[in-house]
Each structure stands twice: as structure tokens, then as C-alpha cells.
Image (spheres, rainbow, N blue to C red):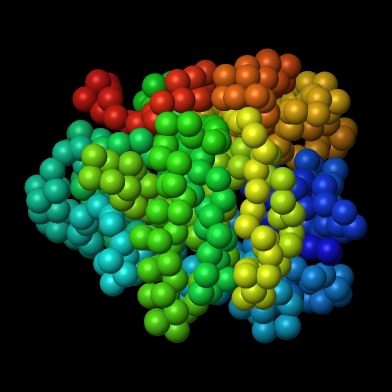
């Protein structure tokens, strides 16, 4: 299969790696990054420019375009590519609003009867204050628009919650869902879905689930503590009703419906929907996937998921640890030389996934973003994979590098940010 992956980050590198490992694969990426360049041919095309992407895909004669990040999907990049007669894995502009607008997403959930947190949409300071009073602490305030995974504040500090609301045009204030968080990726063809193996990611910058939210500092899969039938339960109670509702609205959802869940005392409840694979929680899931990713995504793009077998996964576990640049998540440091990644190239059970990297004029690998790279390792169990991931981290260095030391340390269902009352 000839495929074109759009994006520049770790998720796109993980997708390209999986695709490139399949027989007779030819992988292209736009614009890609230095890690993706090792497994795909790069093209200097803006992933937000749908017409340019469609022209590139047509010129290359690709079988499938896979749109990685949320920004191009919400901007409607999939639409002109699909209009050109090319199979696209990714929702239309209309369907991508399940991530593009938190308010829209909550409206869909309500109409579909999906179990989720109570919420209120606010556009003024008075409305935000009333919502905080109504739903109580800990306060959950979400920017209605895209915010690169950093638009959510969860805090017991009312002033902090109000300040975040004031900084956004529109917010969704929600009740706090108390329970371990789980990521489930549902591959959808508009009417049906197949779930991948559940994962858990770690959003906050500091050990113990403290500090501000980030795009994700690590993840692992599978989850020995989660119910064995969780994925099937989520397909039945969350994903299928959502697909039915989106189809009813005339915006069938084709692509990855990312379901972020809290496993509460009252059962699984949805924290958020995303319209694409997560980053970095996709990385350990794909590291364990044994069935062909390309066939699955192509069938979904063509509305024919029933034609391919359900995805399968290896025994054991996988752990991903992210290395971020100095200042992240408030800022990032660019141009710092990265050393040590080549040491891990010979390891069959360890992958270095590039997220925010570039080459300088001397050809050296340097930092080029907040989350710089991630080490993903597989092992016999979570502890084994975790040990290998941190061994890999210890071979890599760049000025100001920061990473969490507790990713998958206690695989018992960590509640990120649960110790809110202990935060300073």
C-alpha cells in the first residue's frame, strides 16, 4: 500500500513506522520530521492546505491519506482530498467538530445518551462564576476551541479557574470526574467501529500528576487493572451511539474517535472526545499491534471495516516516556543538540519516536518544539517495558531535557491530578 501521513509529531512518526513495517509498503509524509524521514519520503507541503495535500496525493498516486493532527482535521483538510477521489482516514470538517468545539462535543454526547460529566457552556465572567458555583470544586474549565492539549485547567483554586475562563472566548465548565483515566481509540468507518487496546497517558508535567497539563508526558498499554471488556463496553455505550448521532446530523464520522474516559464509581464516563489518534498514548498501542494497520485504516476510510479482521495485539506490554525541552509546557527551547538517539537504533524492543526535532545546518539533530521525542519500549510486562524505556531515556541527552520519572511506575490506575488539594 502507498500511503501519505500528514503531520510533524510523535503520533505521525509512530503511524509511519507501523505502516512502513508492513509488506510492500511505500510511505510518504508531509511535512514529517527527521525521525519520519528514516521510514518515509518527506514532502514540503503544508498539512493545513487541503488543496495542496490533494494535489500531492494525486501526483504520488497514493492509496490512502492519513491525517494525523487535529488542526488540519478541524480546518477541513480531509474534504478536498476526499473530493479528489482519494481514500482519507480522518473526519470531515463537520465531523471533526467533536474535537474542534467542546460545546459541540457535549451536545452530541447529550443527544446520543453518552455517559459524561455534567457541564455548562460559558461566554461571560458571570456565567463562569455561576458554573463554578453550580458544579463545585475541583474546578474543570476547558477552552471550547483547540489548544494543543493544554486548554484544560483542573484546580481547587477558584481564581485560577476564573482566570483561565477569562483568557478564552468560550469555555465549558464541567464537574470533576474522580477515577483513573483511560484512552480508547475507536477506528470508525462512519457506521461501525473497531477498538484498539486501551492505554493510559500522563498529562501533567511533574511526577505525581502535579503541575500544568501538557500534550502528554508518557503512556502505557495494556492496563491490567481495567475491566477486561472495557473496550467492548465503550464501543456499545459510547462509540456506536455517537456514530449514530453524527450520521443523523449528516456528518458521518470516519477516522479515529479518541474516547478519554474516567473509570468512576458509577462506571465509565467520557471526559472528552478527540477526532484523531492521541499522542503519546498511540505509541505503546501501535508498538504492540500485530495486525496490519494500513489495511485497517484503508477499510475504515472506504466504509468497509467489516472486510478486515479485528485488530490483534502481542502479549506483554509497552511503555512510552516523553522527553520535553526546557521551559515546557509554558515555552520551549529550540536548537539544542540531541545526542544518544543513534545508540538505541540497534535495539529491537526500543524505538525512539521523534516529535519536536529538526536538523541544523551542520546536520545535527536538535530540539524544535516542546515535546522533543519519546522512547517506547516493549517487554514481558509493564515493569519490564518500563525498565527498558527508562534505560533508553538515560542514553539520550540535550540541554534542559525534562521527563517524568513515574510513568507506569504503579500500574494500578493512576488518577492524574487527583491530589489537587495537595498542590501548591
The tally of labels here is: 0
- Horizontally, is 270 left or right of 176 in the view? right
Splitting the image into 4 quarters, where does residue 341 fall? top right
Question: Which residue is at 32% across, 65% downward?
Answer: 109
Q: Nearer the viewer, residue 122 or 274?
A: 274
- Horizontally, is 215 left or right of 33 in the view? left
- Spot the residue most to the right: 24
Q: Position of residue 82 (x, y in %)?
A: 67, 79
Q: Position of residue 354 (x, y in %)?
A: 71, 38
Location of the C terminus by quadrant is: top left
Question: Which residue is at 28% across, 46% downward?
Answer: 267
Is residue 337 depicted above or below 23 in this figure?
Answer: above
Whether residue 201 is visible, yes or no, is no
Is residue 24 depicted above or below 346 in this figure?
Answer: below
Whether residue 3 is visible, yes or no, is yes
Is residue 18 depicted above or below 226 in this figure?
Answer: below
Question: Which residue is at 82% across, 76% downward?
Answer: 58
Q: Position of residue 255 (x, y in %)?
A: 57, 65
Q: Position of residue 105 (x, y in %)?
A: 36, 64
Q: Nearer the viewer, residue 135 or 347?
A: 347
Splitting the image into 4 quarters, where does residue 423 fall? top left
Location of the N terminus by quadrant is: bottom right
Q: Nearer the viewer, residue 115 or 231?
A: 231
Is residue 225 depicted above or below 25 in this figure?
Answer: above
- Horizontally, is 351 left or right of 265 in the view? right
Question: Which residue is at 36% across, 60% downward?
Answer: 237
Splitting the image into 4 quarters, where does residue 79 fall? bottom right
Amino acid at each position: 500500500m502507498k500511503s501519505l501521513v500528514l503531520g510533524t509529531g510523535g503520533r505521525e512518526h509512530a503511524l509511519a513506522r507501523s505502516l512502513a513495517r508492513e509488506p510492500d509498503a511505500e510511505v510518504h509524509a508531509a511535512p514529517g520530521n527527521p525521525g519520519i524521514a528514516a521510514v518515509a519520503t518527506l514532502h514540503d507541503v503544508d498539512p493545513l492546505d487541503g488543496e495542496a495535500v490533494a494535489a500531492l496525493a494525486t501526483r504520488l498516486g497514493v492509496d490512502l491519506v492519513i491525517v494525523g493532527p487535529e488542526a488540519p482535521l478541524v480546518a477541513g483538510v480531509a474534504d478536498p482530498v476526499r473530493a479528489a477521489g482519494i481514500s482519507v482516514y480522518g473526519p470531515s470538517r463537520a465531523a471533526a467538530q467533536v474535537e474542534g468545539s467542546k460545546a459541540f462535543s457535549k451536545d452530541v454526547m447529550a443527544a446520543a445518551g453518552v455517559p459524561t460529566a455534567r457541564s455548562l457552556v460559558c461566554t461571560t465572567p458571570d456565567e463562569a462564576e455561576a458554573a463554578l458555583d453550580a458544579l463545585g470544586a475541583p474546578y474543570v474549565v476547558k477552552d471550547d476551541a483547540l489548544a494543543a492539549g493544554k486548554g484544560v485547567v483542573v484546580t481547587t483554586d477558584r481564581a485560577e479557574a476564573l482566570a483561565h475562563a477569562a483568557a478564552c472566548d468560550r469555555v465549558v465548565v464541567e464537574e470533576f470526574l474522580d477515577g483513573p483515566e483511560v484512552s480508547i481509540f475507536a477506528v470508525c468507518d462512519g457506521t461501525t467501529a473497531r477498538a484498539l487496546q486501551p492505554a493510559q497517558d500522563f498529562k501533567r508535567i511533574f511526577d505525581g500528576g502535579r503541575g500544568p497539563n501538557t500534550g502528554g508526558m508518557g503512556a502505557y498499554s495494556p492496563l491490567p487493572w481495567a475491566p477486561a471488556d472495557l473496550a467492548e463496553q465503550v464501543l456499545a455505550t459510547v462509540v456506536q451511539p455517537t456514530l449514530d448521532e453524527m450520521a443523523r446530523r449528516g456528518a458521518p464520522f470516519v477516522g479515529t474517535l479518541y474516547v478519554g474516559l474516567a473509570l468512576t464509581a458509577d462506571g465509565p464516563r467520557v471526559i472528552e472526545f478527540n477526532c484523531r489518534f492521541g499522542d503519546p498514548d498511540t505509541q505503546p498501542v501501535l508498538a504492540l499491534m500485530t495486525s496490519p494497520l494500513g489495511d485497517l485504516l484503508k477499510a475504515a476510510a472506504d466504509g468497509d471495516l467489516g472486510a478486515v479482521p479485528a485488530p490483534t495485539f502481542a502479549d506483554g506490554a509497552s511503555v512510552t516516556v516523553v522527553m520535553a525541552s526546557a521551559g515546557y509546557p509554558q515555552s520551549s527551547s529550540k536548537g539544542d543538540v540531541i545526542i544518544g538517539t543513534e545508540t538505541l537504533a540497534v535495539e529491537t524492543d526500543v524505538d525512539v519516536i521523534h516529535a519536536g526535532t529538526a536538523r541544523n545546518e551542520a546536520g545535527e539533530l536538535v530540539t524544535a518544539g516542546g515535546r522533543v521525542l519519546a522512547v517506547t519500549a516493549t517487554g514481558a510486562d509493564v515493569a519490564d517495558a518500563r525498565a527498558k524505556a527508562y534505560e533508553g531515556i538515560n542514553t539520550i541527552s540535550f540541554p534542559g531535557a525534562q521527563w517524568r520519572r513515574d510513568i507506569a511506575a504503579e500500574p494500578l490506575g493512576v488518577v492524574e491530578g487527583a491530589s489537587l488539594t495537595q498542590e501548591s
